[in-house]
Each structure stands twice: as structure tokens, then as C-alpha cells.
Amino acid sequence: MSDDDEAGCSDGHGDKMLDSSHDALTSVRELGRRPFRVAYDDGEGPDYHVKDPVVLLMAGAAASSDFWKPVVDRLQHVDVITYDRPGLGGTIWPGRYPELDEEVASLTDLVGLVQGHWDIGQPRKVILVAHSMAAFHAEAFARMHPEVVAGVVFVDPSVEWPTHPPRRRSVALPRAVYKVMDSVAGSLGRHAFAVGVMAQTARSGSVVWHQFQEHRLHRVYGSPDAMAMAVAEWIGYDQQAWDLMAVRSQHAWPDVPTVLLSAVYSGQEQELKLHERLAPMLNARLVVVENSHHLMMLDRPEAIADAICSLVR
């Protein structure tokens, strides 16, 4: 089914792939005992309602929160939070693999920040918008803390049903990457990451390359902490998928509005089948988004914005 042209609230802003039309208030905060860079975008305009849920945009493995900017620019009438996990956004990589329970603890603290930043005298719920591997974090959090969740949007989510626990891995590789990136070879990491992004977007290679040369991401992925974090998240993926299975067995999926956006692109037909299996399990409305690769926030940000707006009120 294809609902991506359904009427929504995106307004045509944010055509530049990674450039934002407005600045967010940012700070580094300890969430779940780890450093996160958090950005707050306050809503405005005649359609803004302070009691609406806060939109929480959750980037996938190794992805900077900057990838969300085309979506943020289409959500100017709602309050939005983006964040970078430890290692990105100028924060320090903690030197270990991230774990699912840590991610849930950090999200719990982040929801607490929502109440403090927008103090309106009553608790505000959040809409979780999770891309790729962050779907593990969003699903676990929603199952464990349904009372604060107003809705969930899964953006081309990772889907796994592991049948046995993964092998425990040494942290030697990400530490080695850190050492290499801390040397003159660090520029290779930025170039390698740019090439990886090109493979996951329908945007032309020249546009992506220009953004990596001109935008803040050129500096973000030159950091040894960022590249070590990226490798740690990729290697730690299987363990988080396994841990999610335990959460599923202990906590039912809550009765919250849920949308699953599935990108359609050549060679990924198997992903759609997985999404078709996951959607009914989460009572989610499945939306097939055409003309998009995995990085849907770059290729079809208006589809994500429309899905979010359908859950706001």
C-alpha cells in the first residue's frame, strides 16, 4: 500500500539536505550516566499548541542528529528534540559497546528533560520517531514506559528476530579505530562515511559529497570518538536485537498510535517483507514510501513529517 502522498502538515521548507532554516538550543547533558548532545527546537506559529506532544527524533546507528534537519524544518508548529548519542556531537565515546538497557535509561532521563524545558505545569507526552536501529530503542522504551508515549513512527526500521544470543565481542576494534582516527589518517574516516551515506540515499553523489565537505558533518565524522562510536554501534547491533526479544517477552506493546514507514528501493524487497511482518505485531499502519532509500529523512522528509503530524492531535 502507498499512503505517502496523504495530506499532512509539511510546508515545503527544508529543501537543502542538511541545512536548517532555524537554530536549535543545544546542550550536553548526562542521560543514563552518559553524555548526550541534546537540541531543542521550540514550536511556533498559529498552529502551535504547547500541550501537544513533544516530537523526539532518534537517529539510527552511527548517524548524526543533523540528518533530521530536513524533517525538523517541516515541523515548525511543534516542539522537537533531536540528540546525539555518546561519541557524536562533540561528546566522548565511553569506550564500550552500547546496550539496550542503557538506551532505555537515557531515553527515560531525556523525557525528564522535556518536562523541565517546557514546564507547563503538567506532564507532556512524547512521539518517538525512530530510524533504523533506533527502532530497537523506541520499541523497548514504549513497551516499558507507555504512560509517556503519545505515538511512535518507525522510519525504515531495523527488524530482527534472533533465535540465539550473539557471541560476545572484544572492544578492541573500536578502540583501534579511535587510535587510527586520532592520527593523520583521520580524514579517511570522513571520506568513508560520506561514501556510505551516498549508498543509502537517492540523492546524487555530488550533492552528498558537497554536504560532507561544507557542512558540520565534515567535522563530526573526523572525530576519533565519532568513528569509534560508529564501529561500536555497528558491532553491538546484534546484542541489542537479542535484548529486545527479552523486552518483547516481558512487556506488551501499548495501545498507542503507530506508523511504520518502509522505504522502497531496488534490492531491499526483503526489508519490506520484514516490515509487513512487524507492522501487525505493533498494530502499526504500514506506509510504503516510494522514491526513498534507507535515509528517508534525506530523500522523503515530507513523508516523515506527515506521519508525525497525523499523530500530534
Image (cartoon, rainbow, N blue to C red):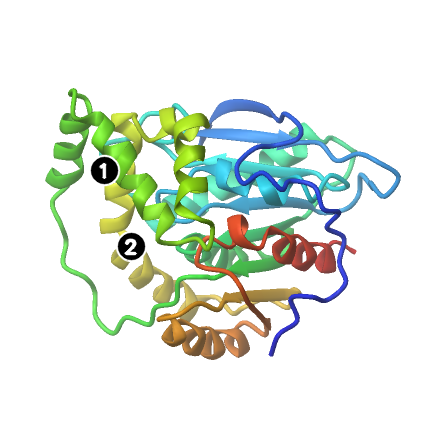
The answer to whether 270 is drawn above or below residue 179 in the figure is below
Q: Nearer the viewer, residue 38 or 33?
A: 38
Quadrant for residue 80, please give it. top right
The answer to whether 74 is drawn above or below residue 254 in the figure is above
- Pointer 2 residue: 237
Query: Is residue 33 visible in the rendered structure shown here?
Result: no
- Helix, strand, or loop for circle 1? loop
Residue at point 61%, 65% (across, down): 258
Query: Is residue 194 visible in the rendered structure shown here?
Result: yes
Q: Is 18 on the left-hand or right-hand side of 199?
A: right
CB atoms of marks 1 and 2 within 8 Å: no
Q: What amino acid type is highlighted by mark number 2?
A: Tyr
Q: Is 255 on the left-hand or right-hand side of 182?
A: right
The answer to whether 136 is drawn above or below residue 227 in the figure is below
Q: Nearer the viewer, residue 33 or 229?
A: 229
Q: How far across and down, in percent of the image, does residue 175 sit?
A: 15, 33
Residue at point 64%, 68% (across, down): 255
Q: Is 188 on the left-hand or right-hand side of 144?
A: left
Q: Nearer the viewer, residue 274 or 220?
A: 220
**Badge 1 or badge 2: first in the primary sequence:** 1
- How many residues crowd mark 1 within 10 Å: few (<14), some (14–19), many (20+)? some
Q: What amino acid type is highlighted by mark number 1?
A: Arg
- Quarter placement of the C terminus: bottom right
- What numbered label is drawn on residue 96? 1
- Quarter placement of the N terminus: bottom right
Residue at point 77%, 41% (across, down): 77
